[in-house]
């Protein structure tokens, strides 16, 4: 029973570390490399952690947790963010967004056929929370529809979620324009 506490603590730290991974933020003028998309969205690879029997329980948990956090952080970004331009107050994708979305599609096609991708719509904090949630959902659905219809990606591999203004980019004010984005995560 005493060995379960360090293991539970380690799993908790791993969960927090996985959610704290960085986001690769592309700007509108950045070229998106499909190979980089596949690497970021691809299956997570982690090193095996070994608990030592002869070390004190607290030391094992601390050492293993530190190693786990370091391994997760060293693995690089876990998602990527694009400033997909849409028509004002709409989910209509503007033509200037298509080259980046085409590169995203090429990267997704490099992934294993079973790999799922979550498409998250985000807004800034201008407007009401309910409006922003609805708009972000419509925009995420629009990107999903584009990837399915224009690139033949299997619809069941893509999940569209609207997060509204709830998750601004780290270090950005809630009203900042950079928060109007579409983020992609491998699942």
Image (cartoon, rainbow, N blue to C red):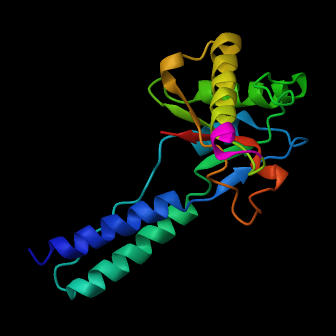
Query: What type of secondary structure mainly makes up the magenta span?
Result: helix
* Observer-nearest of 141 and 37: 141
**Measuring 39% from the left and 69% from the top, which residue is drawn there?**
13
> What residue appears at the point 16 percent right and 79 percent down from the top-left corner?
53
Side of 185 where 147 appears, left or right: right
The image position of residue 149, as x and y in percent, is 66, 11
Residue 147 located left or right of residue 67? right
Quadrant of the frame with the N terminus? bottom left
Hey, which quadrant is residue 171 in on the image? Answer: bottom right
Measuring from the top left, give residue 88's x and y in whole percent.
86, 30
Q: Tell me the magenta residue range.
A: 127-132
76 up-or-down from 52: above or below: above
**Rendered view: 26 above or below 152:** below
Q: How many marks?
A: 0
Q: What is the residue that sits farthest to the left in this orientation? A: 1
Give the residue drawn at x 20%, y 74%.
5
Question: Does residue 129 belong to the magenta stretch?
Answer: yes
* Residue 104 falls in image quadrant: top right
Query: Could you tell me which residue is drawn at 59 percent across and 17 percent down?
Result: 153
User: Does residue 86 sit above or below 48 in this rendering?
Assistant: above
Q: Where residue 42 appears, x then y in whole percent?
A: 54, 40
On the image, the x and y values in percent for residue 81 come to 71, 45
**Residue 48: quadrant of the picture:** bottom left
Asked if residue 88 lies left or right of residue 38, the reply is: right
């Amino acid at each position: 029973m005493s060995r379960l506490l360090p293991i539970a603590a380690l799993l908790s730290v791993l969960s927090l570390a996985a959610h704290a991974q960085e986001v690769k933020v592309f700007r509108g003028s950045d070229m998106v490399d499909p190979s980089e998309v596949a690497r970021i969205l691809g299956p997570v690879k982690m090193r095996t952690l070994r608990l030592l029997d002869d070390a004190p329980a607290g030391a094992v948990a601390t050492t293993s947790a530190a190693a786990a956090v370091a391994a997760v952080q060293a693995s690089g970004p876990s998602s990527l963010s694009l400033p997909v331009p849409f028509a004002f107050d709409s989910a209509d994708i503007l033509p200037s967004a298509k080259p980046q979305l085409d590169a995203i599609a090429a990267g997704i096609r490099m992934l294993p056929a079973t790999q799922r991708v979550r498409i998250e719509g985000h807004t800034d904090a201008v407007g009401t929370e309910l409006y922003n949630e609805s708009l972000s959902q419509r925009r995420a659905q629009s990107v999903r529809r584009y990837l399915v219809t224009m690139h033949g990606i299997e619809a069941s591999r893509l999940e569209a979620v609207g997060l509204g203004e709830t998750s601004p980019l780290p270090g950005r004010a809630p009203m900042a324009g950079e928060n109007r984005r579409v983020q992609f995560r491998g699942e």
